Amino acid sequence: MNDYLNGGVEQYAPVPPVTFYKRNSEFGRPSELFVFIDVEPLSICFTPFEIPVANTQSYFTAPGALHDRKSGVLSFADGHSESHRWKRPVLRATTPGLTANPHPVPSDRTDVSYIRARSHHLATP
């Protein structure tokens, strides 16, 4: 689930003017605000999908490429869903005992910009 929809668990608070949404009435553009996203299997460690806030930040939770190893699905606040083909999908082997560390650093920021632009109506891609 989009971390900005987490209702105020501010361990990793967003940088102003971006804030956590607490009511549906606060959504700026529901058709452009993702709620759920496919997650890369090794990144599943807690519920919120943390949005990278800087171009140098690693993915704490990487988007999934579970469809033909290239695409992921996002659902939006207005109820529609989209399949998105990632420029550089995160593909790590899921072998027993393997952990999410280190968190992957995207080699192409295009995917991060796509996620950021759909994460909050005030976010800068």
Image (cartoon, rainbow, N blue to C red):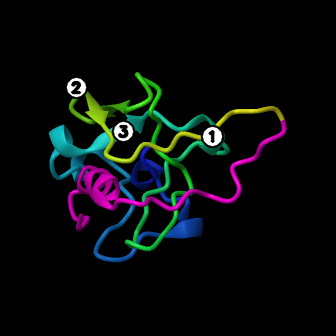
Q: Which residue is mark 3?
A: 35
Rendered location of residue 20, percent (x, y): 39, 60
Residue farthest bottom in this picture: 16
Q: Secondary structure at mark 3?
A: strand
Q: Which residue is mark 2?
A: 80
Q: Amino acid at mark 3?
A: Val
Q: In this rendering, is residue 34 above or below 52?
A: above
Judge the density around disc 2: few (<14), some (14-19), many (≥20) Cα neighbours within 10 Å: few
Rendered location of residue 68, percent (x, y): 41, 22
Q: Earlier in the sequence, mark 1 or mark 3?
A: 3
**Residues marked 2 and 3 touching at CB (< 8 Å):** no
Q: In this rendering, is residue 12 above or below 74?
A: below
Q: Earlier in the sequence, mark 2 or mark 3?
A: 3
- In the image, the segment drawn in magenta is 97-125
Which label lies toward us, 1 or 2?
A: 1
Is residue 71 left or right of 59 when viewed as pictured?
left
| Quadrant, the C terminus | bottom left
Q: CA distance from mark 1 to mark 3?
A: 16 Å
Q: Amino acid at mark 1?
A: Ile
Q: CA distance from mark 1 to mark 2?
A: 23 Å
Q: Residue at x 16, y 38 (%)?
A: 31
Q: Amino acid at mark 2?
A: His
Q: Which residue is mark 1?
A: 44
Q: Earlier in the sequence, mark 1 or mark 2?
A: 1
Rendered location of residue 10, percent (x, y): 54, 66
Is residue 26 left or right of 38 when viewed as pictured?
left
Q: Residue at x 52, y 64 (%)?
A: 58
Q: In this rendering, is residue 100 above or below 109?
A: above
